[in-house]
Image (cartoon, rainbow, N blue to C red):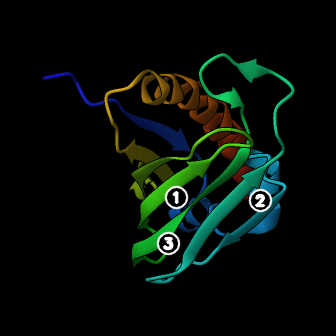
Amino acid sequence: MPQQKSFEHSIAIAAPPSAVFDAFFDAAALAVWWQAIRSVTTPVPLGVFAVEWRPSEWVDDKLGPLGGVFHGTVVDVRAGREFTVAECWWLPPAGDPIGPMSLHVACAPDGADGHGTLLTVAQRGHEPSPRWDRYYDLIARGWHTSLAALKRLAESTS
């Protein structure tokens, strides 16, 4: 059986868990660290989680231009600590949507003083196809860059 691709990454951030959590639900913060041009993210069960990016100038041979919209439904929230978004879909600027997937974000207290955060982001959902495989190859790079930007933002404002 082919291995199911997914993405999971953890990063230590010198900011309180609630500040890191809030960065996923604040349009101004999402514009900075995730380069979102629009977003509606609601931290309640059955809340909307939708983020839009400009289409990239670069065009991938399997996915076309990147950017577009990622959306799903918040199904579980522990305020200031973690949330899960289900039924996530990526709607690329051109081509067919990719999904469904899930996104889980956990902001665990970290450090001796408890004022730091160990942020873990996991995205799951996969079908064995060249488009899905390429999607995970590209989002892994994108998440690493974006989470480093989130770290810089959270640490500069805490």
Horizontal and vertical percent position of residue 146: 67, 38
Taking 46 as reference, is 20 above or below it?
A: above
Identify the amino acid type marked 1: His
**Residue at the spot of label 3:** 80
Circle nearer the N terminus (1, 2): 2
Identify the amino acid type marked 3: Gly
Residue that extends furthest to the front in the rendered view of this protein: 95
Pick the residue in front: 109 or 102.
102
**Residue at the spot of label 1:** 115
Horizontal and vertical percent position of residue 153: 75, 48
Badge 2 marks a residue whose secondary structure is: helix
| Residue at 73% in and 41% down | 152
| Residue at 44% in and 21% down | 130
Badge 1 marks a residue whose secondary structure is: loop
Residue 123 lies in what quarter of the image?
top left
| Residue at 50% in and 83% down | 44
Where the N terminus falls, by quadrant? top left
Horizontal and vertical percent position of residue 95: 65, 38
Could you give the CA–CA distance between mark 1 and mark 3, rounded to whole angstroms? 13 Å
| Residue at 72% in and 47% down | 68
Left or right side of 5 for 20: right
